[in-house]
Structures are given as structure tokens and as C-alpha cells.
Amino acid sequence: MYIVNLYNIRWKKKYTYNDIEKATGLSKATISNLFSGDYHDYQLSTLEKISEFFNCEIKDILIKVEEK
């Protein structure tokens, strides 16, 4: 299973949820879920938008974890 790891990326660049929402069109709920570190079934388009915003590859924001 993979989870999204955005917590460190966000704080390095000092973006707020509002900044991300305005630039990507993603909802605050989706952005909050992305930063939670919990597993969610994200669409590829969501991952593309967030990786474009942070100027990175999708593989850079995913971490493989053992299933619970």
C-alpha cells in the first residue's frame, strides 16, 4: 500500500491549504486528506495536480507502507 507524504514538502515551502486550493482546484477536504498521511484512494488526476503544484514527480510524494 502507498500513502501520500506531503507534510514535509508543504512546510519546506510554507504553503497554506488556501494557497494549494486556489492553485490546484482541489477541495480543502482533499488537501487535508493528502496531508493526513492516512490511506485514501486518490485519483491519478489528484496526484498529478498536487505534484505539479509542488514541482515534483508523483513518485516523490508516495511512500510504500505495510498494510495494517
Image (cartoon, rainbow, N blue to C red):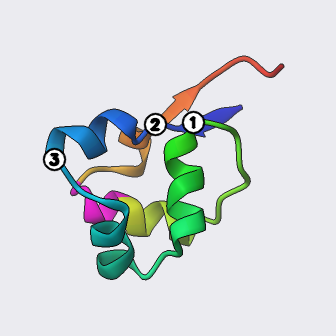
- Asked if marks 1 and 2 touch (Cβ < 8 Å), the reply is yes
Q: Residue furthest right?
A: 68
Label 3 to label 2: alpha-carbon separation: 14 Å
Mark 3, residue position: 13
Q: Which residue is mark 1?
A: 37
Q: Earlier along the polypeptide chain: callout 1 or callout 2?
A: 2
SS category of the residue bearing label 2: loop
- Earlier in the chain: of badge 3 and badge 2, it is 2
Mark 1 neighbour density, 10 Å: few (under 14) some (14–19) many (20 or more): some
- Mark 1 residue type: Gly
Residue span colored magenta: 51-55
Q: Quadrant of the C terminus?
A: top right
Whether 49 is drawn above or below 34: the answer is below
Q: Nearer the viewer, residue 41 or 44?
A: 41
Residue at left offset 53%, top offset 75%: 27
Q: Picture coordinates of residue 65 (x, y %)?
A: 64, 21
Q: CA distance from mark 1 to mark 2?
A: 6 Å
Rendered-image quadrant of the N terminus: top right
Circle 1 SS class: loop
Which residue is located at x 58 percent, y 64 percent? 30
Vertical side of 20 occupied by 63: above or below? above
The structure residue drawn at horizontal position 53% and vertical position 55%, both measured from the top left corner, is 32
Residue 50 colored in magenta in the image: no
- What percent of the width, then of the height, locates residue 10? 28, 46
